[in-house]
Image: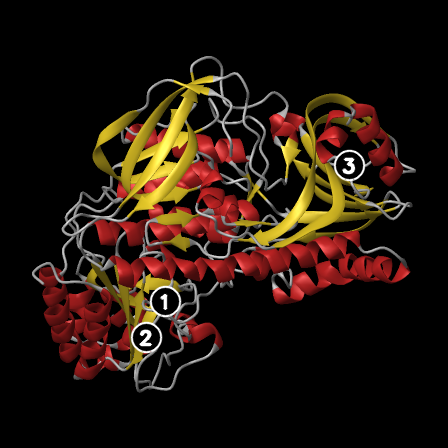
């Protein structure tokens, strides 16, 4: 990028930061928050002067809410967002059907997603960071970056040049109207800047689809640019249709509009505006975009219903790119996340959510490496596993976009039947058929250094293999009245969710599925093996930095014992003793229906039992059938392979 600007003499940081984050959108803020909870000092910069009031994304899916639950931020989101409960479909201004989006309790502790503007998501993260004394440095723009390889005895680092305008800001007037572009921004002429050269051990690039970092390290961004143009508008309107919820409207002209509710009666409407003409200047198209044009397009789709714009907050247009960075990890020092790594259609609301999951995947790995718990060349390349999740998001959003853009009588009949019989299907099966996919509850990683199948046991497929999202389950605390006469039993204890146990940002959770073993003479063996191995792990692997994730300790290994339904009639003293332990210290819980065992591929009665290791980002890293000494040794071998002992 040739410079035509003047620069004041630059300054160079005297110390090497652990992590520099470029981009303070939701993904960059979440990465900064997670690293801060991990006790890792960060510096986060953003080229804008404040959070943008214009929210490109509106929805948070169930998987994102699970992650917020694990990392202790969920309450703010539940308080400020409102549930995505249903979608209505209109054809020629007539209601075809309204399909509920509520999922059954077996899928997740969150039965639906949330409507919450991207700006508010950023505000929540920003508020949490301020509580920890971390602040975004607004107005700083990343100009260049490179990895500097150290000489003999010298450490490698990332050298990044950043700048800020001495007068005004970095954002060009009208720039926020341009969405979906992936090219580098043109240099502003006749601007004067203060520049700094920053050294950091690692750089996380969360700087959007036009990522300067991605361009500077020459990482390819293959994919395609679609020809369709979409108008997006936020504001108030008068309309004969009851546009008070998530709504899909198919017009007599074959075009489709999507309606999303926002606070204070504001609606977001997205509507097709045809294909780009060959050689069309998209920025010129944006400059010529008017409220009147938008209103006429929507009125055509809503016809014969009436539509009139009352006030406008934001009007933009975007072209859809479907692209994914060729690599996410550059020289084990620079990492791409969010739109810097993947862009696609907003259909299905996968973009922001996928970026947040990038941050969740990367943070604990950086924390472990910076604390000497894992070798960087072993752990950091596993961040590439996020690439498959971007491919998944691109494919799903493309499928949903095609479904919305399909025209003709065949497409109309498909949509008509889907919404006509959908509510019946939902009432029978308890969920919309593709909702786990859209809600991102089916995410999984392939085998790698930390997703390790057992070396000798048959490798399970599908829901039970390593790399899958850790599934939820319904449990009961074990209590003594289980084994008293029925007439003497007190009111049943309330159930709890397995996911409520596997919280934290740096903790491995070991789930011991005991089947019937705690009701037999094997109970003592399980208790002894558990205490022996966990004690060894705690002595070998300790976290040096402060951990601020809700626990009063820094134990990296939390163990939860789950027993089968037969334990409710057992009088085993070992079982009773284990029920009195602290959570994470081998406390026992009851899988009364046997479904939680089943969710992890183990038999709840008359089974071998098994042990599952849940990674700090709540994916299955390892699993083994059996709860005997050999099984525990296998788990020990897994940790010994993944982690570096502090005395090595």
Earlier in the chain: of badge 1 and badge 3, it is: 3
Residue 297, horizontal then vertical, whole percent: 84, 35
Element carrying mark 2: strand
In which quadrant of the rendered view does residue 269 lie?
A: top right
Residue 15, horizontal then vertical, whole percent: 20, 33
Residue 191, horizontal then vertical, whole percent: 49, 17
Residue 512, horizontal then vertical, whole percent: 27, 71
Residue 65 seen by the camera? no
Element carrying mark 1: strand
Q: Which of 273 and 306 is in front in this view?
A: 273
Q: Which of 153 and 372 is in front in this view?
A: 153
Element carrying mark 3: loop
Q: How far is the residue under mark 2 from the one under mark 1?
A: 8 Å
Residue holding disc 1: 620
- Residue 525, above or below 4: below
Q: Nearer the viewer, residue 487 or 267?
A: 267
CB under 8 Å between discs 2 and 1: yes
How would you rate the neighbour count of disc 3 (Cα within 10 Å): few for under 14, some for 14-19, many for 20 or more? few
Residue 623 marker: 2
Left or right position of 314 against 27: right
Residue at x-position 48% and y-position 75%: 462
Residue at x-position 17% and y-position 62%: 644
Q: How far is the residue under mark 1 from the one under mark 3?
A: 44 Å
Residue holding disc 3: 242
- Residue 255, above or below 373: above
Residue at x-position 80% and y-position 58%: 415
Residue at x-position 31% and y-position 39%: 159
Residue 428 seen by the camera? yes
In which quadrant of the rendered view does residue 104 lie?
A: bottom right
How would you rate the neighbour count of disc 2 (Cα within 10 Å): few for under 14, some for 14-19, many for 20 or more? many
Earlier in the chain: of badge 3 and badge 2, it is: 3
Image quarter where the C terminus lies is: bottom left
């Amino acid at each position: 990028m040739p410079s035509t600007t003047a620069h004041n003499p630059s300054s160079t940081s005297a110390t090497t930061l652990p992590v520099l984050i470029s981009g303070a959108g939701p993904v960059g803020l979440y990465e900064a928050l997670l690293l801060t909870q991990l006790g890792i000092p960060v510096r986060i910069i953003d080229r804008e002067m404040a959070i943008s009031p214009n929210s490109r994304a509106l929805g948070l899916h169930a998987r994102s809410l699970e992650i917020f639950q694990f990392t202790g931020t969920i309450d703010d989101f539940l308080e400020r967002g409102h549930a995505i409960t249903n979608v209505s479909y209109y054809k020629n201004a007539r209601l075809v059907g309204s399909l509920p989006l509520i999922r059954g309790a077996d899928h997740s502790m969150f039965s639906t997603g949330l409507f919450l503007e991207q700006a508010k998501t950023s505000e929540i993260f920003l508020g949490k960071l301020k509580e920890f004394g971390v602040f975004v440095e607004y107005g700083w723009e990343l100009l260049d970056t490179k990895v500097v390889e150290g000489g003999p005895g010298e450490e490698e680092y990332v050298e990044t040049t950043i700048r800020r305008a001495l007068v005004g800001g970095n954002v060009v007037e009208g720039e926020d109207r341009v969405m979906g572009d992936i090219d580098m921004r043109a240099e502003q002429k006749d601007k004067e800047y203060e520049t700094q050269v920053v050294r950091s051990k690692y750089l996380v690039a969360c700087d959007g689809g036009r990522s300067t970092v991605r361009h500077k390290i020459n990482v390819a961004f293959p994919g395609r640019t679609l020809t369709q143009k979409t108008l997006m508008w936020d504001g108030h309107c008068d309309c004969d249709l009851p546009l008070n919820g998530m709504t899909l409207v198919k017009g007599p002209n074959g075009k489709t509009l999507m309606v999303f509710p926002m606070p204070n009666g504001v609606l977001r409407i997205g509507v097709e505006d045809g294909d780009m003409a060959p050689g069309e200047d998209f920025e010129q198209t944006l400059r010529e975009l008017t409220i009147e044009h938008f209103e006429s397009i929507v009125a055509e789709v809503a016809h014969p219903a009436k539509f009139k714009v009352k006030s406008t907050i934001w009007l933009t247009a975007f072209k859809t790119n479907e692209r994914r960075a060729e690599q996410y990890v550059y020289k084990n020092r620079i990492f791409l996340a969010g739109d810097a790594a993947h862009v696609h259609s907003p259909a299905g609301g996968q973009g922001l959510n996928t970026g947040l999951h990038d941050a969740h995947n990367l943070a604990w790995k950086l924390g472990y490496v910076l604390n000497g718990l894992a070798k960087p060349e072993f752990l950091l390349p596993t961040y590439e596993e996020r690439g498959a999740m971007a491919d998944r998001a691109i494919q799903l959003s493309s499928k949903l976009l095609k479904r919305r853009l399909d025209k003709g009588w065949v497409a109309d009949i498909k949509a008509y039947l889907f919404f006509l019989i959908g509510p019946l299907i939902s009432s029978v099966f308890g969920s919309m058929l593709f909702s786990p996919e859209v809600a991102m509850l089916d995410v999984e990683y392939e085998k790698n250094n930390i997703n390790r199948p057992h070396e000798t046991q048959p490798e399970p497929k599908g829901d039970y293999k390593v790399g899958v999202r850790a599934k939820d389950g319904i449990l009961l605390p074990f209590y003594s009245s289980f084994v008293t006469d029925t007439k003497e039993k007190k009111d049943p204890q309330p159930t709890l969710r397995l996911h409520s146990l596997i919280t934290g940002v740096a903790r491995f959770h070991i789930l011991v599925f005991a089947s019937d073993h705690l009701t037999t003479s094997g109970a003592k063996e399980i208790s002894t093996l558990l205490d022996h191995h966990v004690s060894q792990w705690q002595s070998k692997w300790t976290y040096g930095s402060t951990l601020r994730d809700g626990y009063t300790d820094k134990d990296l290994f939390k163990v939860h014992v789950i027993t089968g339904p037969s334990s409710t009639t057992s009088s085993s003293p070992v079982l009773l003793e284990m029920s009195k332990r602290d959570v994470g210290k081998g406390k026992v819980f009851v899988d009364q229906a046997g479904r939680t065992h089943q969710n992890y591929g183990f038999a709840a009665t008359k089974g071998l039992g098994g042990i599952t290791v849940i990674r700090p980002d709540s994916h299955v890293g390892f699993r083994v059938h059996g709860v005997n000494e050999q099984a525990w040794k296998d788990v020990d071998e897994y940790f010994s392979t993944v982690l570096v002992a502090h005395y090595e």
